[in-house]
Image (spheres, rainbow, N blue to C red):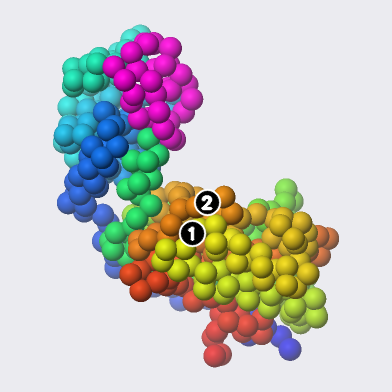
Amino acid sequence: MSTFGIGGSTIEAELNAITPKAHLVQPIQKKEFLERIDKACKLMKEQNVQAVYLHAGTNLYYFTGMRWNSSERMVGALLFPNGTLRYIAPEFEKGTILDFMLVDGDVCCWEEHESPYELFTQILSENGVKEGTVSIDEATPFFITDGIAISQDRYKLINAKPITAGCRVIKSDAEIAIMQAAMDITLEVQKAAARILRVGIGAKEVTDFIHEAHIRYGIPSGSYFCIVLFGVDSSFPHGVKSPKDLEENEVVLIDTGCVLHDYISDITRTYVFGEANELQRNIWAIEKETQQAAFDAAKLGNTCASIDIASRVVLESHDLGPDYKLPGLPHRTGHGIGLDIHEWPYIVRNDQTILEPGMCFSNEPMICVPDAFGIRHEDHIYMTKEGPKWFTDPMHSIEDPFGLNA
């Protein structure tokens, strides 16, 4: 029996059938950025944090709405418990910083020959922080943290994760709506990619199609990433150096996503092009059972670790594993998602984070069979007051993976 919804179409036909959808959801508004700063300040006061440095990248954007990529120059902002923001940037970038600024704050600048680290210390002192600990964005490059540390001896630098993750790990309704729209688009792209498959098609041709399809849906940047693997290549979770072309009756694994209003989608679909053999059917079914067990374990009040453990209980009941041994699951069951494709919380045995409404994370307990194939069903969960909800419906069956004939 051939797989329903796989093959039979063309790249041109699928691209021409796409109607843009990305414009149907709104980006995060200024009011929400201000609410995030308020929450951070509340946490800072509760934890006796004197100041938090937010480095260029997703943490700076999350709290201030300023899009700025990290580079060899120090660009960021110091946030104080009273809500004061002090941006730090090179003098020649001041005009651009002001143009990008959404949440108001003074821009403190350094010339190219001057030390931004001394400026950092000066800003702290001018805002009443004379000594003690200062929290540093955990994504800050080492050269900046090191530069601050060796330029003074008044402050001890500590990890700002309790503040940054303390805010970001709980998604708002607006964040979830954006992620839902992004996931919906990527799922439609996955369905279309399945339809263009044919014997002999190369991974790059599929990757190029997926990129263009995301663009047609209204994502200017196209695919954020794309992994296309056929046959034995699919047994390597994140791909191989030189992907093979598709052959009849092979496993197809496609993992891709896009960025919509700065939030990321990430969906993997695995199925067979042609006729599935007994081993492929068996592992595919175990993967579906394992993914469902992980979903069922995602109860409010449970730990992230409990989800990963639930996955491995199912796998071991089918004589897979144990632990990370193959054939079995070689990595964690999932990861948080939001502005970063991998962020808190992590669905792994040593993460004792308690599940709360607003948390969003992947459910992808991949099964790798060495020298044969891998099966990964990846969908994401968001926690509500009623419990876990799927962003996208899981794979349906090996004969009808997208549930098109259900």
| Residue at point 35%, 74% (across, down) | 386
Label 2 sits on a secondary structure element that is: loop
| Numbered circles on residues, count | 2
Residue 256 left/right relative to 322 = left
* Residue 208 in sight: no
| Residue at point 81%, 65% (across, down) | 372
Q: Quadrant where the N terminus lies?
A: bottom right
| Residue 310 x/y as whole percent | 60, 67
Q: Which residue is mark 1?
A: 303
- Residues 267 and 162: in front is 162
Label 1 sits on a secondary structure element that is: loop
Amino acid identity at mark 1: Thr
Residue 47 left/right relative to 216 = left
| Residue 102 x/y as whole percent | 20, 41
Label 1 near label 2: C-beta < 8 Å?
yes
Which span of residues is magenta-colored? 131-159
Residue 211 belongs to the span the image colors magenta? no
| Residue at point 72%, 51% (across, down) | 240
Q: Which residue is mark 2?
A: 351
Q: Quadrant where the C terminus lies?
A: bottom right
The first of marks 2 and 1 along the sequence is: 1
